[in-house]
Image: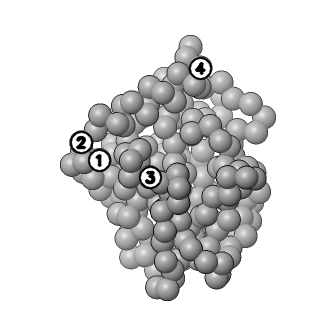
Amino acid sequence: MKDKKSLRKEFEAKRQVMSNEEVHGLSLQIANNVLKLDIWDQSLFHLFLPIQTKNEVRTEYILQVIQGRDKNVALSRSDFETFELRHFLLTDQTTIKVNEYGIPEPKGDDFEIKDEDLDVVFIPLLAVDKYGNRIGYGKGFYDRFLAKCRPNTIKVGISFFEPLNFTITTNDTDMPLDQLVTPKGVVKFRSP
């Protein structure tokens, strides 16, 4: 079995060789599959904006889907001293600025949202196994954030790739996903 570090490296490399057209085409397929999720009775959705240089899923298509359903969207800002995320309601007045790590984030402190107020959280990842255990960039931002959400907050991973057919080694702070959206469809997870 591969360790997290080698899996992280492998999937970062897989994304880096994808063309811009491929990234956009697959991102659009993912957004179309987001419509198949059983989440549309919820109100407040957390979404990440993609780090373009890392060929992350272009979530602007998902944003259009969520806003098309008249749902509220929260975006995060990363604190690299505490490795915590702060969330802010996306409004017509929200200004987005790319931070020094290439992460697009809301500027300003208007309309801050608490972790426990979020109903659905879309989560970036590099790889995920058949039980919903994910590998991110290794800083733990999302695990810390998800640990503060309500137990019934719906955790949805977004990935270009299908789940691995083996189990990723986890620790006590890792937070598994409830569902995964890929270009091929929606995967619901069960525990081992």
Determine contact: label 1, label 3, CB under 8 Å: no
Give the farthest residue toward the front. Answer: 100
User: Residue 3 — which label?
Assistant: 4
Determine contact: label 4, label 3, CB under 8 Å: no
Where is residue 150 shown, x and y percent of the image?
75, 60
Give the farthest residue toward the top. Answer: 1
| Badge 2: residue crowd in 10 Å (few <14, some 14–19, many ≥20) | few
User: Residue 51 — which label?
Assistant: 3
Query: Between marks 1 and 2, how big is the CA–CA gap?
Result: 6 Å
| Badge 1: residue crowd in 10 Å (few <14, some 14–19, many ≥20) | some
Residue toward you, 4 or 168:
4
Question: Relative to 46, does residue 52 appear above or below in the rendering?
Answer: above
Residue toward you, 116 or 124:
124
Where is residue 105 shown, x and y percent of the image?
53, 65
Residue under label 1: 23
In this rendering, does residue 54 appear at all? Answer: yes
Question: Relative to 55, does residue 71 appear above or below in the rendering?
Answer: below
Which comes sooner in the sequence, label 3 or label 2? 2
Determine contact: label 4, label 2, CB under 8 Å: no
Query: Between marks 1 and 3, how big is the CA–CA gap?
Result: 12 Å
Q: Nearer the viewer, mark 1 or mark 3?
A: 3
Which quadrant holds the C terminus? top right
User: Residue 19 — which label?
Assistant: 2
Given the image, on which type of amino acid does mark 1 rest?
Val
